[in-house]
């Protein structure tokens, strides 16, 4: 069995880190992309050359291409791309009256542009591998926008649409494209994030509303791991919600 070669944007923190560790647990090698790759230092220290930490701002198309090409070269090819990096949390939340052109441009450039340009860069490598998987991390906000996060929700709805379009376009190349939409997932900064967001009137209709309670990054990562396995070989174009029943 060949070693899985994966690229994960934002793969050293929070949900992205859990996805990286899922691939590592499955025997894979992972290139993680971060604006500051030093945040992956402990992953590199623990896993050696099975983790490659590279610098990328996914809001910059040229950086996306350089990052993916370097990752592919150092991994010896690409089997999986996970488009996880995004602007979220307090930085993504604004009510209608607070939205300006800079906010709109930044969120769409990073949250949607990053998905498109990293995917564009990865497709030639996936074709050379005989096919592969692109996983886009969306959000329950794609389907149930939370109060005070107009633009963020729109970007995540766009990620779902992009997933459907790319799944159709790339099927002939044996490249599957799927999305995962996390709900209320607890991360290290969740308490402070919740406090800040509630103070701004953002997110109060999402936090603590999940029937199964808050999820963990590993809940998302295990679904991503399955979608990248042979067991999901006939799955493409769909979005899998990991939301503990929030949308039920």
Image: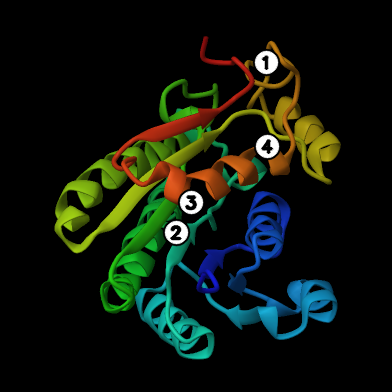
Badges 4 and 2: C-beta atoms under 8 Å apart? no
Residue carrying label 2: 110
Graded by Cα atoms within 10 Å as few (under 14), some (14 to 19) or many (20 or more), the crowding at tag 2 reads: many
Cα–Cα span, label 2 and label 1: 28 Å
Asked whether, in this view, residue 168 is left or right of residue 151, the answer is left
Q: Nearer the viewer, mark 4 or mark 3?
A: 3
Residue carrying label 4: 219
Residue carrying label 1: 210
Cα–Cα span, label 4 and label 3: 16 Å
Graded by Cα atoms within 10 Å as few (under 14), some (14 to 19) or many (20 or more), the crowding at tag 4 reads: some
- The residue sitting at 54% across, 23% down in the picture is 146
Q: Compare marks 3 and 2 and give the one earlier in the sequence.
A: 2
The picture places residue 148, in percent across and down from the top left corner, at 54, 27
| Residue at the outermost front position | 1
Residue carrying label 3: 229
Quick one: SS at disc 2?
Answer: helix
- Snapshot quadrant of residue 52: bottom right
């Amino acid at each position: 069995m060949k070693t899985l070669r994966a690229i994960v944007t934002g793969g050293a923190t929070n949900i992205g880190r859990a996805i990286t560790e899922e691939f590592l647990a499955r025997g894979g090698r992972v290139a993680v992309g971060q604006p500051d790759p030093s945040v992956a230092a402990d992953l590199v220290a623990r896993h050696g050359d099975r983790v490659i930490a590279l610098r990328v701002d996914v809001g910059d198309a040229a950086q996306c291409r350089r990052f993916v090409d370097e990752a592919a070269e150092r991994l010896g090819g690409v089997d999986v791309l996970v488009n996880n990096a995004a602007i979220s949390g307090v930085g993504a939340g604004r009510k209608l009256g607070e939205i300006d052109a800079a906010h709109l441009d930044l969120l769409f450039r990073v949250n949607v542009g990053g998905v498109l340009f990293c995917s564009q860069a990865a497709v030639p490598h996936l074709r050379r591998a005989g096919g592969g998987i692109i996983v886009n991390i969306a959000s329950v906000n794609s389907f149930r926008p939370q109060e005070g996060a107009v633009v963020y929700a729109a970007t995540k709805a766009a990620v779902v649409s992009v997933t459907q379009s790319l799944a159709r376009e790339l099927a002939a190349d044996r490249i599957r494209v799927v999305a995962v939409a996390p709900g209320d997932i607890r991360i290290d900064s969740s308490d402070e994030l919740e406090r800040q967001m509630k103070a701004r009137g953002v997110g109060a209709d999402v936090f603590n509303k999940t029937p199964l309670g808050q999820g963990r990054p590993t809940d998302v990562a295990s679904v991503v791991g399955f979608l990248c396995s042979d067991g999901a070989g006939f799955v493409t174009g769909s979005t899998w919600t990991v939301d503990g029943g929030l949308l039920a």
